[in-house]
Amino acid sequence: MPNMELKRNPMPVQDPKIRSKNFFEVALGYDELTAINEAERCLNCKNMPCVAGCPVNIHIPAFIQKVKEGDFEAAYQIITKTSSLPAVCGRVCPQETQCEARCVRGIKGESVGIGRLERFVADWHNEHSDLNVTAAQPNSKRVAVVGSGPSGLTCAGDLAKKGYKVTVFEALHKAGGVLVYGIPEFRLPKVIVQKEIDTLKALGVEINTNTVIGKTLTVDELFDMGYDAVFIGSGAGLPRFMNIPGENLKGVYSANEYLTRVNLMKAYKDNSNTPVKKGGRVAVVGGGNVAMDAARTALRLGADKVYIVYRRSLDELPARREEVEHAMEEGIEFHLLNNPVEILGFNNPDDPRDVRNGTVTGMKVIKMQLGEPDERGRRRPVEIPDSEFTLSVDTVIMAIGTSPNPLIKNTTSGLEINQKGGIIVSEETGATTKEGVYAGGDAVTGAATVISAMGAGKTAAKAIDEYLTK
């Protein structure tokens, strides 16, 4: 008999007053009994609308059925037939707008907690199972994967399972891409990411770090080295700024730089070689998940006050609801319908040696109102005349998006790029305009979700297999 409770089982979390001062994971996960109880809310629909909402097509009713039966390892095996990163997706995938948005239980109540169950299953497997992966029988083909983020790791894993010799080239000193440098520890513990990477290595995937494709090697040189195909999953690491006065002041960061320093380079440690400003008053400009991550990180680094400054209203805020709620619980203050027009800094013309010269002292902000819808259907924010005010801050973090780095396209012949810097590909296959080269994830779309990047890596892996076996 299914569990017909209208509400899903709540996720246990750290107390906001405690978690805002540490980097431990906020959500604590289901236990076995709670997971089974939540799984029993699933109606096992024959037409499986939830699967249609999953970019990597996990057979959701099948894995949930195994959770109902208490066979958690079997549930894990079902998930990993189509997903290479279940412990990651269970934590950061926006299920509320994808699989859970299609769940029929959501019509008259709350949808089944699919993401929470995926996380539980992956964590249970990691806790109870040894790394016992059987590599596929190798074939004679070699594939180079550029970037070790979610699209690259997914593509590499799918091809390795088919026997391809896969080498992943990562620019930074640690594999994982945005999963390592972009998402904070309190949302995605790095031991989880490393476990997923270790699984891929056990499948035979080789990972070369400190290798910048476009600088250390070019895509053309990869073919000269004997690779039969190349997948580009280099992400979107080029930060965007607003081009307003004061963005070059000391104390202004891109969110990309700020989070990379903290997450990957451990800037929160006293002996770090790449420090960040700590304490004071921090303004984060933007409303996406990256903005929430930066704001909550600043709080954990000892900020006295943290503001989110976003030019639209709460209804238009693009970040996951859960992340917004967590930020609010932790005391982060939201300045909605506000937009920066200038960053202010200290200047002592009488003493140019004054170390305070050129440092942030505040941010001039103008109030906004929502006007007519733009080309994407969102109401366009419009400035309210004579509504400017000054926000007293010491640090400003710009979290308004990123673009693909132009390095690869500038050093590779035959790749066509769109106006936003993304690599042009076939939507069906991920094939670029250069023979044997495929691409996916943020390098194509600009900054997007982890799961959409994984879906692109999966699509490309299938197409590469067909290309090399035809």
Image (tube, grey):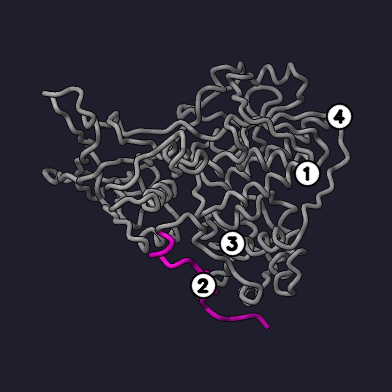
For this rendering, which residue is in front, 116 or 198? Answer: 198
Query: Split into 4 quadrants, where in the image is the N terminus?
Result: bottom right
Q: Report which residue position mark 1 lands on.
A: 202
Q: Is residue 83 left or right of residue 130?
A: left
Please identify the quarter of the rendering in which residue 177 is found. Answer: top right
Between discs 2 and 4, the one toward the N terminus: 2
The furthest residue to the front: 271
Tag 4 near tag 1, CB within 8 Å: no
Q: Which residue is mark 2?
A: 10
- Alpha carbon distance from label 2 to label 4: 50 Å
Q: Is residue 37 above or below residue 207?
A: below
- Closer to us: mark 1 or mark 3? 1
Mark 2–mark 1 distance (CA, rounded to whole Å): 35 Å
Question: What residue is disc 4 on?
Answer: 140
SS category of the residue bearing label 4: loop
Within 10 angstroms of label 2, few (less than 14), some, or many (20 or more) residues?
A: few
Residues at badges 2 and 3 in contact (C-beta under 8 Å)?
Answer: no
Q: Position of residue 324 (x, y in %)?
A: 40, 58
Residue beneath disc 3:
115
* Position of 9 relative to 206 (above/below): below
Q: Which residues are magenta?
A: 1-20
For marks 4 and 1 on the same chain, the one whose residue lies earlier in the sequence: 4
Disc on the earlier residue, 1 or 3:
3
Pick the quarter of the image with the C terminus.
Answer: top right
Image coordinates for residue 360, horizontal then vertical, percent: 24, 36
In the image, taking residue 45 as reference, residue 113 lies left or right, namely: left
Examine the rendering and report whether any part of residue 116 can be seen.
Answer: yes
Q: Nearer the viewer, mark 2 or mark 1?
A: 1
Circle 3: residue type: Gly
Tell me if 73 is positioned left or right of 153 in this view.
right
